[in-house]
Image (cartoon, grey):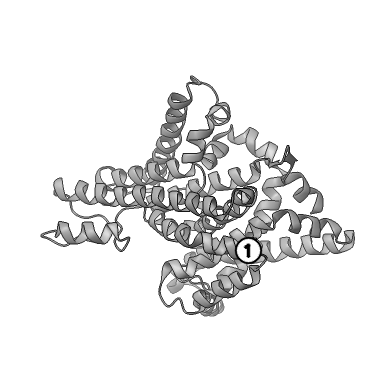
Amino acid sequence: MSKQVAEADVVVQGKTERIAAFDLMRGFFLIVIMIDHVELYPNGWDFITGKGRLWVSAAEGFFFLSGLLIGMIYKRRLHLGMKYISLRMWQRAAELWAVGVSLTLIFVAWVEFTHHIPIKDGLPEPFPWHHYIEQALLMRFTYGWGDFLVRFAILMLIAPLVFFLVAKKKWWLALAGMLVAWHFRGQGFTWSWQLIFNGGIIIGFYWQELKRWLQNLKPKTQHYLERTVYGVAFVTFAASYLSVYLLSLLNHLYGNLTPWLRHVTYTWNNYNYDVWVYAQKWTMGPLRVVLFCFWFSTMFLLVNRYQEQIKRYSRGVLELLGRNSLLVYAIHAFIIFGLKMYFIPAQTNFLQNFLITGAGLTLLIGITVLYKSFTSGSGFSRPDKWARSVNEKRRALFASY
């Protein structure tokens, strides 16, 4: 474990080299989010996503990575002062707010002016424009599949306070505040998911210290810790994956099962229900938080170990998507909206599901590739070359949120 973590973060001329594993993971998360938002099952693609019904989803990884990178990046800028850091974070919040609100208003106008039947969270008729524009500007109303952006904007507004406490070595005070907010979260999404985002800020800030701590552990302890993380992650992931596919099949065939298999299915359903009581997604249940820690750690270790093979077989696509997450997320919102408005029939079969979802993924990758090609002037070359050739200003604009 120590060797993998050490190789992941190399300091060159006072700057931390970009961690490729994070870009690859974020690119993968975006693909999973795209597949699950198309929401046509079965489609073949869903075997890598769990239909969005696993005990931990790609969205949590996305939130955590965003906080993690904030902690790592702004720690290097501490010498510029908290005023500079706060302004930069608030500027980022303003960008996310502007994009998120724009997407909401565009999608609402798209439905209203084309007189199309609302495809998500039915809109009232007649539509009170003044009211909903105000609510959108206040981040109380979102529409479409870009709603995470305004939630990130809210978290970025409070990020300077969390970062300030961590920078002052008061991480324990920041953690206490996070836990209190999470405990009294009710049904509030933002107060639930801030635990993942702000936890990422703390870990990102102390990334180097955590790496050294792991390196200083005895080899036997490192080996035991690594095997424990792998073991818990693999066992719980397998249980979650089987509950999505095998348990669903058993429930579908319940009337034709033998008595003992019915009993197994009944018991399994009760067990699965109990797990979901503590693994709620919207309110970030405690079991979900714990499982996320194991699943994310395992994924990072594996991606970091095999990153060169992943880059080669993905032909730079995952890295390209991961490095341009805001752009890709906005593109995905338009593609999902267009597909659901015009291209998904009322009844579909497996082949149609496969082709429509695949077309959505192809569009997502293709538009991103073309955009980066035109903005970087790199011509038609491999995606990984495009990703490397993008200038720093554009990369900063469309980097992690």
Residue at which label 1 appears:
166
Q: Residue furthest top?
A: 379
Quarter of the figure with residue 364: top left
Neighbour class for label 1 at 10 Å: few (<14), some, many (≥20)?
A: many
Q: Nearer the viewer, residue 151 or 343?
A: 151
Q: How far across and how far down the image is residue 174, in percent?
A: 59, 69
The reply to whether residue 390 is in sight is yes
Write the residue at 49% across / 49% down: 88
Disc 1 residue type? Val
Vertically, is 360 above or below 66?
above
Q: How far across and how far down the image is residue 241, in percent?
A: 56, 62
Write the residue at 63% across / 66% down: 236
Q: How far across and how far down the image is residue 333, in percent?
A: 36, 47
Write the residue at 48% across / 70% down: 192
Write the residue at 75% across / 50% down: 5
Q: Secondary structure at mark 1?
A: helix
Left or right: where 99 falls relative to 50? left
The reply to whether residue 238 is in sight is no
Q: Nearer the viewer, residue 108 or 278?
A: 108
Q: Nearer the viewer, residue 355 or 39?
A: 39
Count of picture labels: 1
Left or right: where 100 falls relative to 215? left
Vertically, is 364 above or below 33?
above
Vertically, is 7 above or below 223?
above
Q: How far across and how far down the image is residue 153, in percent?
A: 42, 56
Looking at the rendering, in which quadrant would you find the N terminus?
A: bottom right
Left or right: where 212 falls relative to 31? right
Quarter of the figure with residue 295: bottom right
Vertically, is 12 above or below 216?
above
